[in-house]
Amino acid sequence: PIKPRHSKDAVVDVAKLKHAKNRNQTRYLTEQEVIRFMESFAEMAKGEDTCFHLLALFQLQTGTRIGEAAAVTWDDIDFDRNAINVSKTVHWGRGKEARRYIQLFTKTGESRVIPITESLKGMLCWMKSFRTKGLVFSVDGNEPLSYRSIQYRYDKAFKMAGISHRSTHILRHTFSTNFLTATKDHFTLAKFLGHASTRQTEHYAKVTNALSNESFKSFNQNVEEKFGNVLN
């Protein structure tokens, strides 16, 4: 943090700052990166690390913030409706010995319901065979995972997979990009992410539009190579 007496001397390149923010918001894992990341996590998933592996899978299929995912309890999951109620988040204090606890509200203060895929439901059913009460992603069901332990394992999996990203939030971006690419439904994505409006999902649209343009370029090149002589 910059002390008040230095604020007048501080120089901030607003353009660069905005560019960096937009770049971070549009980062996501490609299909091959997701596969490598999860394969790396699977190699690490021994004993307690299994919990972190499943947490990453959960994020990839729900788009939840890491604090929201870590705060999900078995009471939040409705297996009959195939949905999860996201209404809490983990508060992680700063420092190695800082206290962590469950806050009974999300970042935006609004709860939301997110449908779950069949594969995610299968994973949760398997996990439920070991424990049916308390926190879903926890060693004992009572104590939330520490952020340091989550970040350490995510970073390790990224490194093993040869991926430069070092953030738990990249999985939320990946879910968003994949969902919008498949559905083009901005309204539903905003609802699932807990955004107040579709304006907050616009940066994902830029990514999917770029993907569409690249796909068309590949298609155009293919057409030209195969039928160029006939069509001209």
Image: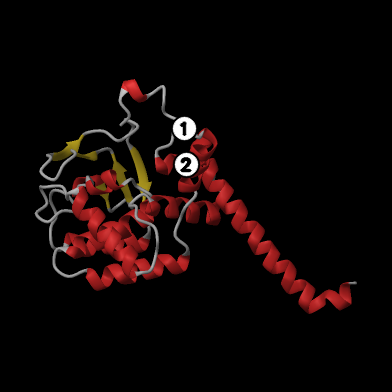
Q: Which residue is mark 2?
A: 21
Q: Amino acid at mark 1?
A: Val
- Check the image and report above or below for 106 versus 46: above
Q: Is residue 150 above or below residue 130?
A: above
Name which of mark 1 and mark 2 comes first in the sequence: 1
Please, what is the three-letter code of the amino acid marked with disc 2? Lys
Q: Nearer the viewer, mark 1 or mark 2?
A: 1
Q: Quadrant of the N terminus?
A: top left
Marks 1/2: CA distance? 14 Å
Disc 2 packing (10 Å; few <14; some 14–19; many ≥20): few
Q: Quadrant of residue 52?
A: bottom left
> Do residues under tags 1 and 2 come within 8 Å of each other at their CB atoms?
no
- Apparent side of residue 57 relative to residue 193 in the rendered image (left or right): left
Q: Using a 10 Å C-alpha cutoff, classify the residue at mark 1 as few (fewer than 14 neighbours), some (14 to 19) or many (20 or more).
A: few
Residue at 30% x, 58% y is 56
Could you tell me if residue 124 is visible in this image? no
| Secondary structure beneath label 1 | loop
Query: Residue 95: horizontal and vertical position, in percent?
Result: 16, 41
The answer to which image quadrant residue 171 occupies is bottom left
Residue 2 is situated, as x and y percent measured from the top left of the image, at 33, 29
What residue is drawn where x is 18% and y is 59%?
A: 128
Instruction: Quickly name the residue at label 1.
Output: 12
